[in-house]
């Protein structure tokens, strides 16, 4: 059992060395793109929610 775990650990280490890790600048740029898209989509959802609330409130009489 212990030998199987050790073999697995060796194989994982060997595979991890094959990974082509992105550079710091590339990682930073991708993170900024993701953060920007989150803000844009959040704005769109907020805007649609506000629009639908404004449109539905007179019809239902319920809303904030």
Image: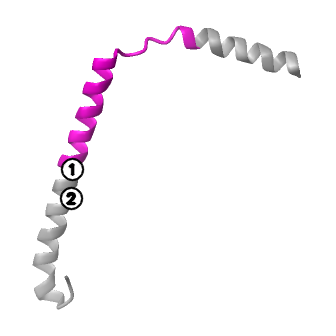
64 vs 32: above or below: below
Q: Is residue 23 left or right of residue 58?
A: right
Find out whether residue 5 is within the magenta segment. Answer: no
What residue appears at the point 30 percent right and 32 percent down from the top-left corner? Answer: 31
Image quadrant assignment for residue 15 = top right
49 vs 20: above or below: below
The coloring applied to the image is one colour
Dominant secondary structure of the residues highlighted in magenta in the image: helix
Question: Could you tell me which secondary element the residue under label 1 belongs to?
Answer: helix
Residue position for label 2? 45
Rendered location of residue 55, percent (x, y): 10, 77
The quadrant of the image that shows the C terminus is: bottom left
Q: Identify the magenta region.
A: 16-41
Question: Could you tell me which secondary element the residue under label 2 belongs to?
Answer: helix
What residue appears at the point 29 percent right and 26 percent down from the top-left corner? Answer: 28
Q: Is residue 16 left or right of residue 60?
A: right
Report if the CB atoms under discs 1 and 2 are less than 8 Å apart: yes
Residue position for label 1? 41
């Amino acid at each position: 059992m212990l030998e199987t775990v050790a073999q697995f650990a060796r194989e994982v280490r060997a595979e991890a060395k094959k990974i082509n890790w992105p550079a710091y600048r590339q990682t930073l740029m991708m993170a900024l793109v993701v953060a920007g898209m989150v803000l844009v989509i959040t704005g769109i959802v907020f805007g649609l929610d506000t629009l639908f609330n404004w449109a539905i409130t007179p019809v239902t009489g319920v809303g904030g």
